[in-house]
Image (cartoon, grey):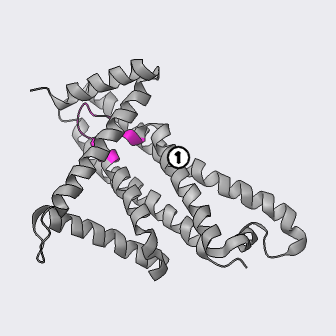
Amino acid sequence: MVHPLLFLQFLSSKLQHLLHISDASANAVVYTWTVIALLLVLSLIATSALKTIPSGTQNFMEVVVDGIENMIVETMGEHGRPFFPLIATLAIFILVSNLVGLIPGFYPPTANINTTAACAIVVFIATHVIGIKHHGFHYLKHFLGPIWWLAPLMFFIELIGHLSRPVSLTLRLFGNMNGHELVLMIFFALAPFLVPLPMMLMGVLVSFIQAFVFMLLAMIYIQGSLEEAH
């Protein structure tokens, strides 16, 4: 039987030679697919035999789903429920991707800037699509400010502010996860037994915090696009 880590490394090397990309990018793609496959299998297991009184995997997933849904409602109100699939998918994907890096030999997809940029761009596009869908052409008022004669200046200020959002989301998640991954690698190289353990425990906390921050900012951005311009 082939060891999963060896199989993933084999896929990464083949992808690297096939697409002529860097080793880090190949790892990010392979482990992203791995996380997607894990989440797909987990969702199939949780929904394969639904019960009125949940137990096992169904019970665990219902706790996760209810927790995210309650957080969305508390942050965005009842009108935030339609965006639950988008926000929950991003939150769970980012969390699992972060936690994968704590397994020795595995590479967290969120430690690669391409993965974090893809997630950030999804939030950026979704925010403005939702705003245009909700307000129509009046959505442009969000960029013009409250005083008409300052509208040209406010437009460029707001435009820069909105364009900085995906950059901020990308670099925050990438920087934290890549930095933690480098620290873990250094500790494992220097003392591979008990010394890295506290860093791994802190890595669990960092993984949850970064997933929470990304989800919270996504909710705030979408909520802002739904509000009326003043």
Pick out the residue farthest to the right: 149
Q: Amino acid at mark 1?
A: Thr
User: Would residue 140 be found to the left or right of residue 183 on screen?
Assistant: right
Give whichever of 85, 48 is nearer the camera.
Answer: 48
Query: Which quadrant is home to the C terminus?
Result: bottom right
Crowdedness of circle 1 by 10 Å Cα count: few (<14), some, many (20+)? Answer: many
> In this picture, is 205 found above or below 50?
above
Residue 160 x %, y %: 72, 54
Q: Residue at x 30, y 26 (%)?
A: 11
Residue drawn at (34%, 45%), measured in percent from left and top? 97
Is 13 in front, or is 96?
Answer: 13
Q: Nearer the viewer, residue 75 or 21?
A: 21
Report the side of 105 relative to 69 (left or right): left
* Picture quadrant where residue 45 is located: bottom left
Residue 108 highlighted magenta (yes or no):
yes
Image coords of residue 46 (percent x, y): 18, 61
Q: In the rendered view, would you say 217 is above or below 139?
A: above
- Single out the residue that lies furthest toward the top: 17
**Picture quarter containing residue 2?**
top left
Give the labeled residue for mark 1: 170
Instruction: State the SS at label 1.
Output: helix
Q: Which residues are magenta?
A: 97-110
Whether residue 131 is visible here, answered yes or no, is yes
Side (left or right) of 78 relative to 46: right
Tell me: 143 left or right of 119: right
